[in-house]
Image: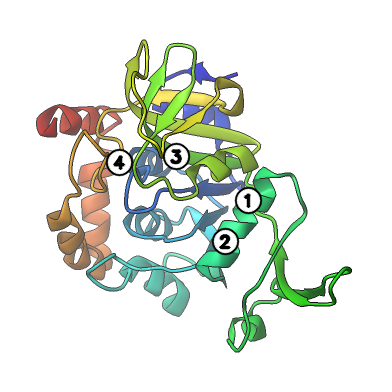
Amino acid sequence: MARFMTLRDAVAECIRDGDRVAMEGFTHLIPHAAGHEVIRQGRKGLTLYRMTPDIIYDQLIGMGCAEKLVFSWGGNPGVGSLHRLRDAVENGWPHKLAIEEHSHAAMANAYEAGASNLPFAMFRGYLGVDLPKVNPNIKRVTCPFTGEELAAVPAIRPDVGVIHALRADREGNVLLEGITGVQKETVLASRRSIVTVEELVDDFGPLNRNAVVLPSWTVTAIAVVPGGAHPSYAQGYYKRDNAFYIAWDKISRDRDGFLAWIKDNVLAKGPDAFAAHGRKVA
């Protein structure tokens, strides 16, 4: 059953060195505050999963938290490269980063398989492409009923799934609306989960047709962190901070500039910095 706690306590209890960690959110509801707390607590040796690693993973990689990245696309959306990711892969700074690349379809199906407690995902795909030549975790299997050859990849079963959501009620149920990506599957596939939310409410009220409600028993820890998705957006709370995505390209190009930004904006601050942002933009 979900327990309410501070973000600091949630990360301290749920995320350990060497864990397999998935922080998901597709353009919307990316758990930046949680990622910053992982950096502040100095976690190391993590295997990071994410369909679209962007700024928060650039920061985690640049601070030496990650040993391996399993992903299906990596970049600063609408801007360009992730310079800390590239530096780790190409130059081994701050240390060498192993990578395992998949397609979006493979990652989505792998999360679904993990959420269903299956050992692997099977789907139509990876025909006429080169990824199977460099990724030994892409296999082909034969359907025992039709003889059709299909692609197969291992299920994603993180030790910890981390997402940001809109609201939690006082019983620990969690609401997501808008673009939901694979957040639901991430929580269900993970052994432990942390959910940061914009606010705590008595009742969710009328729900949109695409609403996802995660029951309390699927979640380990809930932390109320207003603004916790910034610079991504939270539907109904604040818009995407496009200017920050553009600014990150310059901040992250230089190692010293990156470290100075992290020192001033992450290490010197706590989750309250996100709460202050939430009040400012609400």
State which mark lies toward you, 2 or 1: 1
Q: Which residue is drawn at 49% across and 18% down?
A: 172
Count residues near mark 3 (Cα–Cα under 10 Å), then give few for <14, some for 14-19, many for 20+: many
Residue closest to the far right: 144
**Amino acid type, residue under disc 2 in the picture:** Met
Q: How far apart are marks 1 and 3 (CA)?
A: 16 Å
Q: Residue at x 57, y 44 (%)?
A: 185
Is 155 situated above or below 218? below
Q: In which quarter of the image is the N terminus?
A: top right
Residues under numbered marks 3 and 2 in contact, where contact means CB atoms less than 8 Å apart: no
Q: Distance between the residues labelled 4 and 3?
A: 9 Å
Local SS, label 1 = helix
Figure label count: 4
Does label 2 or label 1 sit earlier along the sequence? 2
Q: Name the residue under label 2.
A: 107
Q: Is residue 92 left or right of residue 78?
A: right
Tell me where residue 239 appears, x and y as whole percent: 18, 44
Local SS, label 4 = loop
Tell me where residue 250 appears, x and y as whole percent: 17, 67
Q: In which quarter of the image is the C terminus?
A: top left
Local SS, label 2 = helix
Q: In this view, does 139 lie to the left or right of 27?
A: right
* Label annotation for residue 163: 3
| Foreground of the two, 8 or 95 | 8
Q: Name the residue under label 4.
A: 229
Does label 4 or label 3 sit earlier along the sequence? 3
**Amino acid type, residue under disc 4 in the picture:** Ala
Q: In this view, does 279 lie to the left or right of 232?
A: left
Q: Distance between the residues labelled 4 and 2?
A: 22 Å
Tell me where residue 77 appears, x and y as whole percent: 28, 65
